[in-house]
Image: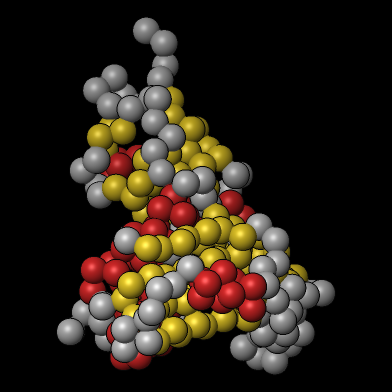
Amino acid sequence: MTRQTVRVELCGKLADIAPAAITIDVPAGGMTARELLAAAGAAHPLLSGERIKVCVNEVVVDGNFAIGPGDTVALFPPVSGG
Amino acid sequence: MNAHVALAHEAFDAAEELRQFTVALADEGAIVSFVGRMRPTDADGSALSALVLEHYRGATLASIEAIVREAHERFLITASRTVHRVGAVAPGQGIVFVATAAAHRRAAFEAADFLMDQLKTRAVLWKREESGTGRRWVEPAASDHDDQARWDKR
């Protein structure tokens, strides 16, 4: 079986502490946004923390959201406009 | 909903934005506009060369559209115009333009105030101050969260 991965884009200051994108392995049964964040944090300690939000296909999702290999995933640090 | 929402990749002309907003209105009695501009110094008074606003795909525009939709649901405004810069903003340039129109002034003032408080903490943007000596990411201040929370109680 081929290994399945998802590419995770890093936004804002997160792109300063790690590359602009990282690759996370996806288990055969898929993974939740919470599990993805935990995997990202294990790979790069600075990517852990409850202030980081997971964005899937351009929408911020909650921890239980199921992520698959075809999804466009990004990690958001706290946002600020205006 | 008569709402214009746009991301500007280049400097915008606030007077022209207000003109375009105004000419499309009917007989509203109140128009409020706000322009947020880049200050030339940071919180410590050190000179800045630019404020860079990073955005993310369609999520940034969608986040601003959601805020504008809320403003239209919440206040008796008939129209709004919201323009937010992305990319490198120079000192003195506009960062954000917000205009609202209503039959009477209170709704127009409140909607513009609401829009700005929400944009500060909810728009999908990341701000970075750049100076001759380096760069620093700017996150919402505690006061920005307090400003946003004012609207929760109503």
Residue B151 relative to residue B26: left or right: left
- Residue closest to the eye, B110 or B50: B110
**Number of marks:** 0
Q: Residue at x 60, y 44 (%)?
A: A20
- The image quadrant of residue B38 is bottom right
Residue B106 relative to residue B9: left or right: left
- The image quadrant of residue B103 is bottom left
Residue B101 relative to residue A16: left or right: left
- Residue closest to the eye, B34 or A44: B34
The picture places residue B115, in percent across and down from the top left corner, at: 39, 75
Residue extending farthest to the left is B154
Would you place residue A17 above or below residue A71 in this image?
A: below
Would you place residue B102 above or below residue A56 in this image?
A: below
The picture places residue A26, in percent across and down from the top left corner, at: 36, 27
Residue extending farthest to the right is B132
Q: Residue at x 74, y 73 (%)?
A: B90
The quadrant the C terminus of chain B occupies is bottom left
The picture places residue B43, in percent across and down from the top left corner, at: 62, 88
The quadrant the N terminus of chain B occupies is bottom left
- Residue closest to the eye, B145 or B120: B120
- The image quadrant of residue B86 is bottom right
- Residue closest to the eye, B43 or B37: B37
Q: Residue at x 28, y 27 (%)?
A: A30
The picture places residue A41, in percent across and down from the top left corner, at: 42, 48
Q: Is residue A52 visible?
A: no
Q: Residue at x 56, y 76 (%)?
A: B18
Q: Is residue B89 visible?
A: yes
